[in-house]
Structures are given as structure tokens and as C-alpha cells.
Image (cartoon, helix red, strand yellow):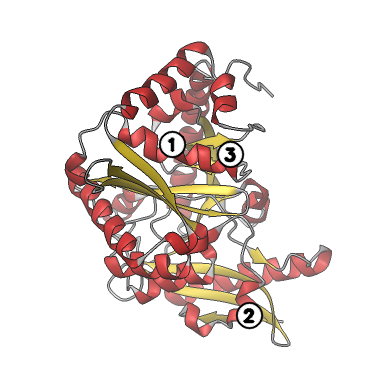
């Protein structure tokens, strides 16, 4: 058994990688990683240099881990800029660092990609081999630290028992409680919130729009170009950084149409597209990623309709159990998205900085626990599950 370092997804055997792709997480699918590379959204000059650690035994892939050698902290959504500044103020380099994450994607999913049939001692051996490979790569590259972002809860023990400090963050997630349709979801909300959602949808209904769901073969190259324009429009309004380019959107629309949902709003009279929301899905999970509107669109509640309500309808119709609508967004709570802990794992090499950062993480966790208790007082459901 050995772990090989590969520096492009093109260098990884396609059939072998397919056996490792998670069933409910599209962002480690070969097509997505290849789109990032082919569009040069990652690679030279991007701050994200990919290193795929692939554990093999006699040519058979047993497990893998996607790593990036980072020279900045852009596009991670778990913020450590203050850590980097502290290093700089004391004359130490914080970069490069190693990060296991999906670039520009705050989605929760497995980091240890293991063959499903592995069990017991084999699973433990492959996991250990991958962690050993992280350590060896980090030592050779002279990194200050290693990080894994948006780690699922079931993987935390593997990181913590190897010296990684677990950091808590929070997102707002929507869970399907066995709803048959959107009206079932509405009925589960307490009166004030139910009326609010119904009012927002009713107000938008008078704005002269037609909304369609496009996926699979219905997605055309012009839809990719359109979504890229919407993406830029949102960033322009928020002074954001365009991490992704038009080539990325073109590639994923071409190769991942069966895992993409584009929710598109058109003017009912002119048929002109005015706004869109891009989602990815796989298995039981839907992920909201990007949204944009032409010149702000000017329609009341359009963002809520396209990014939340239409996506919830799609998730219910497909029998999906989880909808992650992206980072942040306290306003999601009133619309049925509940605060949910998310996790990251951090291994700091310098002993003094390790102590300071771990102390900071402990304090941050306590503050977040207090915030979660406060959010619980505003649960939007009639009979919230308190377990």
C-alpha cells in the first residue's frame, strides 16, 4: 500500500476515482474538480495548488484526499486572516499552508474519500496512510499549518485524535421532515412565519414573472453564459472577488447537467431572463451556490423565491432530505432554515501559536453555543424537535 501525490485530476485514473466519489456530495466528482482546473480557477496564480493524495494497493485505489497548497486565505469561508496577521506581526510566515476543502464552496462533505466496502482494519490503515501523507507533504513544503474545512461530524474523531483542533462554525440548513409538497412544509411553520412565506410568494406572483427549473438536457451553453453574468452582477453589488470565470460555468453546465438545477426567472411578456439561482445536487442533498439578477431586477422577494422556496419545492419533489443554501444568512431562520453547527479541523505547527489559536477556538465555540441557544428561542416550526 502506498500513497501517490498527483497534481491534476487528469492524472488520476478516472475509473479508480469514480469508486471514491461520495454519494451525496457532487463537489468531489471528477467533473467538478476538472472544471476548476480547466478553467484555471485553481492552479498557477490562483492561490490554490491542487495535490491529490491517492492511496493504492496493487493498482487498486483504496482512498484519497483532496489537498491544496495555499498562499492566501481567499475562497475558504472559514476565516483565519487574523491568525495570518498575528504570524506576520511576530515575524513568522503563515503561508504556505495545506487545506483540504472544495475551493470557493462552503459545503459540508467528506474529506476522507474511502472505498465504501473497506471496513475495520483496512479502513483504519488507509486513513492512517492518508494522514501520514499529509504530514510528509506539509514537512516538505514547509507549511505553517494544515486545515480541513466543512468536515462532516462523523469524520471529526479521525482528525481530533491526530492532534487537529476542531473549530465550530454555523450555517442555516433546511431539512425535509417527510413533506409531500410545499404546502406540507408551510403547515409545519408556526403561524407568523407561515403567513410571512405565503405573503412573500403572493407578492411576487403579481410581478409578471415566469419561473422554470432547468436541469439535465434542458441546460444549454447559453444558460451557462447567462448564469455567469448573474454571478458577476451579484459580486459587483457586494464588491466581491470573482473567483470563477465563464469557462468554469461552461464546463460544469456541459459535464454536470444531471447534477445542476438552474432556477430561472423570465419576464412573462418579453421572455427576457431577469434572474437565476444555480444549485448542485446529488443523492439526497441539494446545495445552493450562486444567484444573480439583472440590474437588481427590482422585484420584491425575488431572491427568497428563487434561492429558497423554489429550491425547497425541488428538494421535496425529489425526496431530498437536506438543503444547504450556502454560508451565513440569519434571515434564513424565519424561512425554515435552522442553525446548524459546521466543523473545521486545524493543526498548527508552531507551539506558541498553537496554544493561542486553540484558546481562541475554545472561546469562539463558547460564544457560538450561546448564539445557538438564542436562535433556539426563535424556532420557526410549530412543534420543533428539541432533542
Image location of residue 367, percent across then percent down: 46, 28
Residue depicted at x 47% and y 51%? 354
| Mark 1 vs mark 2: in front | 1
Which callout, 1 or 3, points at the residue further toward the start of the chain? 1
Rounded to the nearest angstrom, the CA distance separating label 3 from label 2 is: 32 Å
- Left or right: residue 95 versus residue 283 is left
Image quadrant containing the N terminus: bottom right
Residue depicted at x 43% and y 21%? 198
Image location of residue 142, percent across then percent down: 42, 72
Viewer-nearest residue: 376 or 249? 249
Rounded to the nearest angstrom, the CA distance separating label 1 from label 2 is: 36 Å
Image location of residue 61, percent across then percent down: 68, 78
Is residue 332 shown to the viewer in this render?
Answer: yes
Secondary structure under the numbered disc 3 in the rendered image: helix
Viewer-nearest residue: 275 or 321? 275
Is residue 142 shown to the viewer in this render?
Answer: no
- Left or right: residue 178 versus residue 143 is right
Image location of residue 122, percent across then percent down: 79, 70
Q: Which mark is residue 316?
A: 3
Which callout, 1 or 2, points at the residue further toward the start of the chain? 2
Viewer-nearest residue: 282 or 339? 282
Residue depicted at x 58% and y 48%? 285
- Left or right: residue 176 versus residue 34 is right
Q: Which mark is residue 308?
A: 1
Task: Give the residue number, with chain letter if any, for mark 2.
Answer: 15
Viewer-nearest residue: 95 or 307? 307
Tag 3 near tag 2, CB within 8 Å: no
Rounded to the nearest angstrom, the CA distance separating label 1 from label 3 is: 12 Å
Secondary structure under the numbered disc 1 in the rendered image: helix
Q: Is residue 41 above or below residue 280?
A: below
Image quadrant containing the C terminus: top right
Amino acid at each position: 500500500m502506498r500513497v501517490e501525490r498527483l497534481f491534476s485530476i487528469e492524472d488520476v485514473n478516472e475509473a479508480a476515482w469514480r469508486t471514491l466519489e461520495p454519494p451525496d456530495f457532487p463537489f468531489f466528482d471528477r467533473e467538478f474538480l476538472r472544471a476548476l482546473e480547466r478553467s484555471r480557477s485553481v492552479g498557477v496564480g490562483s492561490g490554490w495548488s491542487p495535490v491529490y493524495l491517492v492511496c493504492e494497493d496493487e493498482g487498486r485505489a483504496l482512498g484519497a484526499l483532496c489537498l491544496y497548497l495555499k498562499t492566501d486565505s481567499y475562497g475558504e469561508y472559514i476565516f483565519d486572516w487574523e491568525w495570518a496577521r498575528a504570524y506576520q506581526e511576530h515575524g513568522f510566515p503563515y503561508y504556505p499552508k495545506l487545506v483540504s476543502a472544495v475551493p470557493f464552496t462552503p459545503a459540508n462533505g467528506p474529506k476522507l474519500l474511502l472505498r465504501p466496502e473497506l471496513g475495520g482494519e483496512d479502513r483504519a490503515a488507509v486513513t492512517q496512510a492518508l494522514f501520514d501523507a499529509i504530514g510528509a507533504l506539509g514537512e516538505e513544503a514547509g507549511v505553517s499549518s494544515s486545515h480541513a474545512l466543512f468536515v462532516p461530524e462523523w469524520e471529526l474523531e479521525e482528525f481530533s485524535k491526530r492532534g487537529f483542533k476542531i473549530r465550530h462554525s454555523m450555517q442555516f440548513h433546511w431539512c425535509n421532515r417527510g413533506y409531500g409538497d410545499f404546502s406540507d412544509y408551510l403547515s409545519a411553520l408556526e403561524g407568523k412565519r407561515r403567513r410571512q412565506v405565503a405573503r412573500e410568494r403572493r407578492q411576487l406572483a403579481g410581478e409578471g414573472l415566469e419561473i422554470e427549473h432547468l436541469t439535465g438536457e434542458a441546460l444549454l451553453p447559453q444558460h451557462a453564459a447567462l448564469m455567469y453574468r448573474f454571478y458577476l452582477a451579484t459580486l459587483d453589488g457586494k464588491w466581491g472577488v470573482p473567483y470563477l470565470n465563464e469557462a468554469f460555468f461552461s464546463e460544469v453546465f456541459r459535464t454536470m447537467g444531471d447534477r445542476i438545477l438552474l432556477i430561472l426567472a423570465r419576464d412573462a411578456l418579453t421572455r427576457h431572463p431577469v434572474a437565476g439561482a444555480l444549485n448542485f445536487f446529488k443523492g439526497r442533498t441539494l446545495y445552493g451556490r450562486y444567484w444573480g439578477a439583472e440590474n437588481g431586477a427590482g422585484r420584491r422577494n425575488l431572491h427568497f423565491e428563487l434561492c429558497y422556496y423554489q429550491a425547497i419545492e425541488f428538494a421535496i419533489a425529489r425526496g431530498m432530505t437536506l438543503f444547504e443554501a450556502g454560508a451565513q444568512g440569519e434571515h434564513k431562520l424565519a424561512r425554515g432554515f435552522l442553525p446548524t453547527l459546521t466543523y473545521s479541523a486545524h493543526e498548527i505547527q508552531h507551539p506558541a501559536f498553537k496554544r493561542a489559536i486553540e484558546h481562541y477556538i475554545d472561546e469562539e465555540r463558547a460564544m457560538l453555543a450561546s448564539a445557538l441557544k438564542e436562535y433556539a428561542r426563535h424556532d420557526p416550526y410549530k412543534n420543533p424537535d428539541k432533542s
